[in-house]
Image (spheres, rainbow, N blue to C red):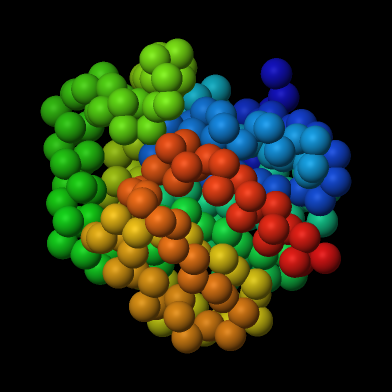
Amino acid sequence: MAFIETDQEIQVYYEKIGKGRPIVFLHPPLMGHVAFLCQKDLADQAQLIFYDQRGHGQSGYKASPSLGQVFTDHAEDLRALIEQLRLSKPLLVGYSSGGLIALTYALRHSENIGGILLAGGFPCVASHLLRLEYQLGIQLMKNGNQDLLARLVAKANKNSKQEEQVMYDYARKADSHAVLDLYRAGPKADLTAQLWQLNQLPMRILYGSSDFYIKKHKQFFEPLAHTEIITVDRAFHQLPTHHYKVFNHLIMRFLRQLG
């Protein structure tokens, strides 16, 4: 088991496998690093870093002083991980709202990032259905129904009963306050006015063709000069799991394009 300690003295769990250019994976709320079980096959082509965000999985937790500070604190946890592992120009891969952490990090630490690839990413919550999804998460967590939410998330992402059990068990480990922090902070986050600062950063933004209420957020990324929007046919939101073959291919293609 490997940990780094952040500036706030939080123990953050990580796994590092493979060799080559580093890729750091950022999971959505509740899931922990097991959201990326299907990406471990890339270890023979790159160096992969999977970690549990604060309050998730095996990582420690410390509350942020305000909801407006939540993603900043997560971005600084990521900075500590990147610095202590001495990762040079990593590719950040964010799944769903994990992308908000990747974008926040890029806006704060543009000097040490190679590129960003987002699966179902958004810089703000601009969809009514996405806002409802956040509200559902908030209500379930507030009412002590983390077990139910863990079951729903695991079922939505699994490729097999074994994967479902692993994801369910790991989601139950999350600190309820940490998960609630992210669900409450998500709808309040809005990075759209700052995205122009990432105009020179290579980015790939992936959406499932049937992920209607998420892919509308592509409008915020389209003006950026070095950003490419990619639509995955016959896919919904769960690209890293249900469509891992094409997702993994797109990660490695982007990594080669970065040089």
Q: Position of residue 190 (x, y in %)?
A: 35, 69
- Residue at x 38%, y 33% (from the top left corner): 157
Q: Is residue 148 left or right of residue 119?
A: left
- Above or below: residue 196 compared with residue 213: below
- Residue at x 55%, y 48% (from the top left corner): 247
- Residue at x 33%, y 64% (from the top left corner): 215
The answer to whether residue 101 is seen in the rendering is: no
Q: Is residue 169 left or right of residue 17?
A: left
- Residue at x 61%, y 36% (from the top left corner): 39
The answer to whether residue 201 is seen in the rendering is: yes
Q: Quadrant of residue 231?
A: bottom left
Q: Quadrant of residue 147?
A: top left
Q: Is residue 160 left or right of residue 20?
A: left
User: Which part of the image, by quadrant, shows the C terminus?
Assistant: bottom right
Q: How many marks?
A: 0
Q: Position of residue 67 (x, y in %)?
A: 33, 54
User: Which part of the image, by quadrant, shows the N terminus?
Assistant: top right
Question: Closer to the camera, 169 or 157?
Answer: 157
- Above or below: residue 69 compared with residue 160: below
Q: Quadrant of residue 177?
A: top left
Q: Position of residue 246 (x, y in %)?
A: 55, 48
Q: Is residue 28 left or right of residue 4?
A: left
Q: Position of residue 226 (x, y in %)?
A: 62, 79
- Above or below: residue 210 compared with residue 50: below
Question: Closer to the camera, 170 or 47?
Answer: 47
Report the residue that reaches farthest toward the front.
Answer: 234
Question: Closer to the camera, 36 or 253?
Answer: 253
